[in-house]
């Protein structure tokens, strides 16, 4: 059996291995068996999902697998991924499950797992579960089969938790906010939370139909929200992705600010207040060199990890850091949450707008970026283009060309069959030539 778990749980095209209902049932049974090894009499698991049509199918399949091994299942319905992390801890569950492919198109889906502490499972635990999937598990005796129950107020509990991270005596009166919910899991909670805090809310991406999640909207397609901000004279735009664990912000001029600029803002602010633990920000290898220079100028460090918010969180927990994230918009504030939370991050930005009385355009330009270029090359499952001799040679040449003024990063995506080629350099033309040379070599390898 091919490896199930990738960068963020199990992910793929719905009804295609590994994202089939049969495999979801087996995974559910394996996870249930793993978490019932502690000898406790009763075990419970919370399951949330985003708005993909296939979510119904996987919700039922996972429930069947989990209850077959004696787990009691609490079904949250459509809620953001961070809500699952929160409610796993709040409801004293042994396990949390989120059915989502995050920012991927609607035809994809995925399964993410959270332990009883609300944090995503480690690689070692995932390996043990994968072994159980491969070997199969014995179902529980008939009198020990688990129960399933709908929890109707999960999203309200989440909204209250997110609002509790906002300054107690502060309101959003006078702020006009465009919020793009990507037709995803936050289509109700995000507009509600903003309205309850006093903002004038202009919602978009709030009409999910099972097929339109992330389609031309949300954090991966912020252009529509940017146009809406300008058209309505809004103060700021907040773009979430399908499961609302990442955010991209838009200033009042329609300019897009990424996770790096937001992290720079918060790191600088928290350092001034003595709140930035360890004097460091944790981010991935994808974050811009400009962010690193910004931190160094303030006597702060950038701790880099592999791509994936789970690796950011792991490093934060290891080092005792409390702020981290990704350029793509995962923002992790472990003082408040166990995973990336797009809505929570958006509220923190609005709080800084109110506190500083500065426009979004100023707050979203903390540093000048070093020119950066990212290109993707799709390959077929089973192909290994990075092992071809001419690709290896092209990468070596590009690294030599960029040495001194920048860097080159080549990696396989953990969520899609893509080779990602990213470079940074003070000489933008040299950077582009280097990236194009590597991309051409990879494309040639894929075609043969």
Image: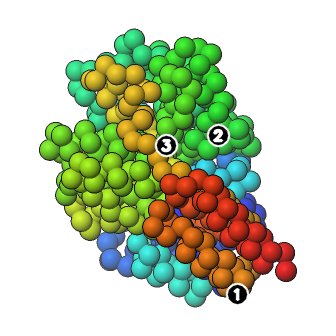
Q: Which residue is farthest left? A: 274
Quadrant that contains the C terminus? bottom right
Which residue is drawn at the image coordinates 70% and 57% (left, top)?
A: 108
In the displayed structure, 272 sits above or below 285; it is above
Q: Nearer the viewer, mark 3 or mark 1?
A: 1
Q: Nearer the viewer, mark 3 or mark 2?
A: 3
Q: In this view, does 183 lie to the left or right of 86?
A: right
Label 2 sits on residue: 221
SS of the residue at dot 1? helix
Mark with earlier residue (1, 2) = 2
Q: In which quarter of the image is residue 303?
A: bottom left
SS of the residue at dot 2? loop
Residue 367 in percent (x, y) is at 39, 42
Label 1 sits on residue: 389
Which residue is drawn at the image coordinates 21% and 53% (left, top)?
A: 299
What is the spatial separation of the Cα atoms under label 3 and label 1, in whole angstroms?
35 Å
Q: In which quarter of the image is residue 347?
A: top left
Residue 253 in percent (x, y) is at 54, 23
Label 3 sits on residue: 258
């Amino acid at each position: 059996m091919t490896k199930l778990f990738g960068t963020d749980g199990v992910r793929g095209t719905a009804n295609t291995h590994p994202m089939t209902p049969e495999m979801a049932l087996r995974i559910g049974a394996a996870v249930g068996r793993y978490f019932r090894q502690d000898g406790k009499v009763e075990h419970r698991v919370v399951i949330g999902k985003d708005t993909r049509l296939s979510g119904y199918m996987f919700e039922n399949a996972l429930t069947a697998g989990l209850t077959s091994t004696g787990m009691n299942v609490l079904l949250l319905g459509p809620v953001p991924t961070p809500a699952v992390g929160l409610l796993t801890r709040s409801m004293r569950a042994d396990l949390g499950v989120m059915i989502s492919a995050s920012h991927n198109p609607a035809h994809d889906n995925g399964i993410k797992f959270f332990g009883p502490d609300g944090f995503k499972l480690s690689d070692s635990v995932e390996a043990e579960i994968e072994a159980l999937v491969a070997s199969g598990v014995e179902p529980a005796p008939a009198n020990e089969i688990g129960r399933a129950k709908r929890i109707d107020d999960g999203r309200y509990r989440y909204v209250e938790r997110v609002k509790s991270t906002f300054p107690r005596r502060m309101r959003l009166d006078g702020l006009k906010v465009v919020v793009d919910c990507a037709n995803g899991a936050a289509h109700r909670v995000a507009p509600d939370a903003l309205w309850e805090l006093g903002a004038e809310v202009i919602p978009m991406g709030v009409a999910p139909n099972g097929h339109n999640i992330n389609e031309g909207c949300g954090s991966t397609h912020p252009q529509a929200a940017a146009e809406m901000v300008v058209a309505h004279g809004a103060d700021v735009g907040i773009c979430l992705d399908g499961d609302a664990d990442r955010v991209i912000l838009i200033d009042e001029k329609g300019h897009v600010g990424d996770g790096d600029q937001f992290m720079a803002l918060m790191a600088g602010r928290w350092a001034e207040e003595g709140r930035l633990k360890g004097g460091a920000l944790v981010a991935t290898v994808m974050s811009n060199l400009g962010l690193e220079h910004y931190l160094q100028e303030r006597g702060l460090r950038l701790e880099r990890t592999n791509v994936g918010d789970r690796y950011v969180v792991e490093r934060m927990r290891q080092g005792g850091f409390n702020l981290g994230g990704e350029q793509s918009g995962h923002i992790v504030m472990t003082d408040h949450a166990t995973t990336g939370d797009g809505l929570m991050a958006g509220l923190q930005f609005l709080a800084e707008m109110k506190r500083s009385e500065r426009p979004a355009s100023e707050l979203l330009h903390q540093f000048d970026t070093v020119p950066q270029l990212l290109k993707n090359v799709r390959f077929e499952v089973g192909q290994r283009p990075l092992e071809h001799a001419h690709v290896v040679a092209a990468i070596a040449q590009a690294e030599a060309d960029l040495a001194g003024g920048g860097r080159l990063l080549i990696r396989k995506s953990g969520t899609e069959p893509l080779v990602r080629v990213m470079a940074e350099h003070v000489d933008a033309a040299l950077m582009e030539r280097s990236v194009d040379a590597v991309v051409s070599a990879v494309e040639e390898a894929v075609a043969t």
